[in-house]
Amino acid sequence: MTVAASESSGAQPEVRTAAGALRGSREAGLSVFRGIPFAEPPVGALRFAAPRPVRSWDGVRPAVSYGPPPPQAGAFGMDALSQDAADDDWLTVNVWSPEPDPGAGVPVMVWIYGGAYVIGASSLPEYDGGRLARDGGVVVVTFNYRVGIEGFAQIEGAPANRGLLDQVAALEWVRDNIRAFGGDPDRVTVFGESAGAGSVAALLAMPRAAGLFRRAVAQSAQGTFFSAALAADIAAACASELGLRPTVADLSTVAPARLPAAGDAVAAKMDQWVERWGQAAHRSIPFSPVVDGDVLPVTPWQALADGAGRDVELLVGHNRDEQRLFTALDGLLGEVTQEQAQTALRVFAPGPDGARGYRDGFPAAGPDELYELVNSDWLFRMPTLHLAQRQTAAGGRAHVYELTWPAPGMGGALGACHGLDVPLVFGNLSSGQAAMLIGEDPSQEAETLSAHIRAAWTAFATHGDPGWPAYDTEQRLVQLFDTRPAVTAYPEDTSRLLWQDHTFPALPLKAGRDPAVTAPRE
């Protein structure tokens, strides 16, 4: 591609990457570059392929606007973002740098967004890296990766985990180019939340990602990883919605913007598949990283137990009331029935007698609390804690936190819910999802807590110490983030003991090997 240079760059910063020159913008003392392609658009002949290196360009390419998001599911109206996109250059990175000098050697923080592996885009306002970069003295990088069917469906003729391969490609771009933006490629920290933190965990287990980052932060790691059989069965159901087979040849005939609707249709009726798809169907989770034996050889917990992360420093943690947000979105706050709580305990509690363990461990808990506890533990809290436990047991280092500060939004009904950590980490307290969680006029208390968290994250990225002791299996010290932060023994000890023997295997296909749907006739 050829990009003509403008007549005058003025005060606009310019850098030269391996693919060509870029011109960004100056914003509040930072040099900012948006929409930089790190791979070729994965469309046409490259549809459902592993990411390919971007071709070089001539002249100076403007880098002042975010690239378009990858195709999105319909949750929260995100599908409108991809349907309105003017082009298909989804695989782009954005950089905020305090000093774009190749000799600056500034620590680098690379963000991986969440969104249940079906939605997400680096252009969302809550992921603006300006305040984190400026106050923390770090280079912040955000990027897009493929989600939903494009990124995670098990498609015949395509590599598994294309969304994870996009993440590796973005990290390779950072390794090869970040020095030009003032960053130190030997001090890269990946950090992410929810599915983004699940992705961070997956990267720890991926041979292709080895050596691409020195430190990792997993915030409320989504603990779902699929077996190849389960992923293939769900992909067959998605393709069947379109009268197609789950192959590259068939699915490539569907326009990218139209394809997520098939995944949405399957997710909307997953209650019909609970006997076959098990826990994934109970939570309407159609896509997750696939333990395929190649791109992702084993689960993150097995990889860490085997020592895969011993040379990577970890910072992991979760929010106290993870499930509360989803209960509110489902209209069930204060409305959970005894039957719903019993079903949740039967489906998600660990071991053959896990339901009784929850009732005995929390004798005063009613249906609402039991429902919230077991869902929080299964999907976020215990998978995250076990990352630290497997890491330390294998001789590695991990720091653990828990966010207990209750969100003031919605009259305080959400508690320390899922997603509350994101605006606090970035310092964007009144944009995007923060308005619902924190309110449109952030309090000084919120500002102070955000500053504390941002200082901890950037200190960890700089020298590996967020400001509290490393986790060990005896004292189990963790940082509590609240109005008055404190270091204490891990407070969710009842849950920890209930889950101590759980191995977090890849979720299986429960009903034999026959496909869930029959392929259409030729």
Image: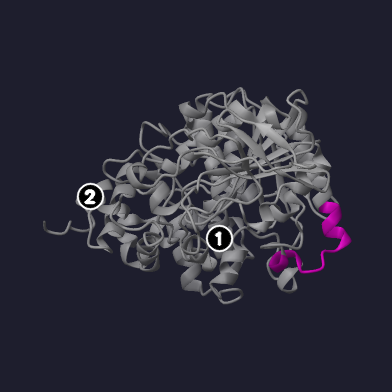
Q: Identify residue type, mark 2.
A: Gly
Residue 518 place in picture, x, y as percent: 17, 58
10 Å crowding of disc 2: few (<14), some (14-19), many (20+): few
Bounds of the magenta segment: 435-449
Total numbered labels: 2
Q: Main secondary structure of the magenta part?
A: helix
For marks 1 and 2 on the same chain, the one whose residue lies earlier in the sequence: 1
Q: Residue at x 78, y 42 (%)?
A: 10
Residue 65 seen in render:
yes
Q: Identify residue type, mark 1.
A: Arg
Residue at the spot of label 2: 512
Residue 219 place in picture, x, y as percent: 64, 46
Looking at the image, residue 453 lies above or below residue 204: below
Residue 359 is tagged as 1
Q: Nearer the viewer, residue 484 or 340?
A: 484
Q: Nearer the viewer, residue 110 or 60?
A: 60
Tag 1, which secondary structure? helix
Residue 473 seen in render:
no
Q: Is residue 355 left or right of residue 113?
A: left
Q: Disc 1 or disc 2, which is closer to the eye?
A: 2
Looking at the image, residue 137 lies above or below residue 427: above
